[in-house]
Structures are given as structure tokens and as C-alpha cells.
Amino acid sequence: MITPVRRFAALCALGTALGGLAACGTAAQEPPAARPAAPAHSSSTSPTSPTHASGSPTPHTSAAPGKAGAPSRPPTLAPGPAGLTPVFRNAPRTADKTVALTFDADMTADQGARAASGEHFDNPGLIAALRALKVPATVFMTGRWAEEYPDQARSIGRDPQFEVANHSYSHYAFTDDCYGLPTVPANRMRADVERAYTAFRKAGVPNAMPYFRFPGGCYDQRALRAVSGTGVTAVQWDVVSGDAFATDADAVARQVLEGVKPGSVVVMHCTRSAAPTTERAVRTIVPELRRQGYRFVKVSELIGAASGRR
């Protein structure tokens, strides 16, 4: 039997062969070497320096409850062994039926010519649908996407219904053999993450979150070590939507509805050319999950629950 994970990987590989690297921003499953020990469920903080030179995420500046004047930082997980970047996949399975829909806004560093020729790596219809349905969501954006669509990046980043997180600048892989993606050298991995934050600021995104999704979902110990200095929490998922290159919105919706559990993180795409059915699938998924008693939240709320912060 072909499992959803294997089907997603096959579609991603097929898309790469067809030149559609952008939609491979969320591979179905990381390689075996990419399974670090589960991080401690305690909070750590994002970098506190707001300097633009470092490219690291700038903390939120609203006052924290009970601490007048103190900055309120997004929740993160504590570093893993030897300070490795912590990895988050889903919140604890509690009676609180929360679920986070995440959308990868993928565009690789070398796809400018394709965008100039009319290929659409954005999906304004999907964002409009999420707004109309009043669904909070987390958008994992590449820096190259923010450069190509600065108005949309700014609109998403300034809308309190959404949060923008980091999906690298280049959308090149952080491991070898990751669904055909080009590979970032180890000594450039941190710079690639930081360059994305710089691109977000230039586009007008005020408070990108200290969360990072590896291109292709592929990582290993070397990659976790390389990006540890940025202070991010790596965010994976436990539900693969299968929307990459899908033509059947109902099948995508069924796959999500069958996979969601309390605390789930669902991975989808915000890329018209590579995931054309996502908006229609969302319009089915949202009312059904609400009917089942689920509440939609951003990734930050799930990480807050995992780290003891609400």
C-alpha cells in the first residue's frame, strides 16, 4: 500500500523532475538521520538583539503579562543536547482540540525568471479565503518569496490573524539528497536563515517569528548545529496534506481530516503553480474540523502549550 507519506514524497520528487522545486518545501518525512531526540518541553527565548546586521529575528515588544514594560517574546523550545536547535512537531495530545494550519510560501533563489515569465508562486486567493473563514495560520515564507511579493508579505506579516515564520532564504536543502533540491553548504546555513529575516524586514514584515522550517523538511545533526546560533525552534509537522501538485481538492481534504489529532500541525502550501487545489481543500477542511470541535491556532500557541506558556 502506498502511504500518504510515500505518496507525498513521490509527488515532490516528480515535481522536482518537472522543474517545480518550490513545492518541495515540505517533504513528507525527514530521513532517518534527521530524527533528533525529542526536545525538552520548556521555553527558551528568541534572540534579544534587534540589530539588522545579524539577521536574527527581532523580539516582539509588547509588555508581558504581569511585567510592565518587559518585552513579550514568542514561545520557543529549549535547545536540545549540546545546544542543538530544538524540533517541534505537534503539541501534547490533550483534551484541548487545537490544530495549526501552516502554509509554505516557497520560492527558490533561482526561480526569478520563471516568476517574470508569469509563473505564480503566490496564492492571494488562499490568503483571502483564510481571512474570510477567520482562520489563524502560520506562513513559512522564504526570503526569496518575500522579495518577489513584498506587498503580499507585508500584508500577511501585519495581519494579526497570521504569523510569518522562516523557511530559509534560498529554499535550498540543508542536507544532501533532499528531493532534488540544491544544497546549502554547511558554512552558509546560518547565513541563509538570517538572510531570510533580512528580506522579511525589507518587505515590511515587522515581527517574523523565531520558527524555522527546513526546506524539504530535511535536516540532520549538522544542520541543527549550524542554525542553532539563530535562536530558532525548528518546526516540522505531523499531518501531511498532500497538496503538492495535487489536482483533487477532495482527496487533499480527506487526507487532512483523517490525520488531524489534538495539537496537530498540518503542512500545506501557499503556491498557486505547485499547489493549485489548496484553497478549495481549505474551504472543506475548516468547517468540518470546526464541526468536530477543533479550534484553529497559530504555531506559536501550540509551542506555548508545549513549553508551558499560554
Image (tube, rainbow, N blue to C red):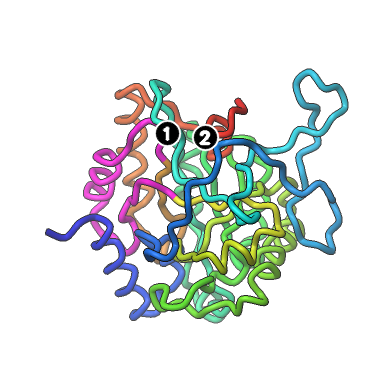
Observer-nearest residue: 114 or 58?
58
For residue 194, what is the image quadrant?
bottom right
Identity of the residue furthest to the front in this view: 82
Query: On the rendered structure, is 279 left or right of 85?
Result: left
Compared with residue 309, is residue 127 higher up or lower down, i.e. above or below?
Answer: below
**Quadrant, the N terminus:** bottom left
Name the residue at 38% across, 21% down: 95
Counting from the top left corner in percent of width and height, residue 16 is at: 37, 76
Counting from the top left corner in percent of width and height, residue 295 is at: 43, 26
Queried whether the magenta region covers residue 239, the answer comes back as yes
Queried whether the magenta region covers residue 286, the answer comes back as no
For residue 229, what is the image quadrant?
bottom right
Residue picked out by circle 2: 302
Observer-nearest residue: 52 or 269?
52
Name the residue at 56% across, 80% down: 110
Dot 2 or dot 1, earlier in sequence: 1
Badge 1: few (under 14), some or many (20 or more) residues near its Cα, within 10 Å? many
Counting from the top left corner in percent of width and height, residue 99 is at: 42, 34
Q: How many numbered tags mark residues here?
A: 2
Badge 2: few (under 14), some or many (20 or more) residues near its Cα, within 10 Å? many
Q: Secondary structure at mark 2?
A: helix
Q: Secondary structure at mark 1?
A: loop
Amino acid type at image mark 2? Leu
Observer-nearest residue: 84 or 73?
84
Compared with residue 18, is residue 245 higher up or lower down, i.e. above or below?
Answer: above
For residue 310, what is the image quadrant?
top right
Identity of the residue furthest to the top in this view: 66
Amino acid type at image mark 1? Gly
Q: Which residues are magenta?
A: 237-264
Residue picked out by circle 1: 263
Name the residue at 81% across, 36% down: 61
2 and 1 marks in contact (CB < 8 Å): yes
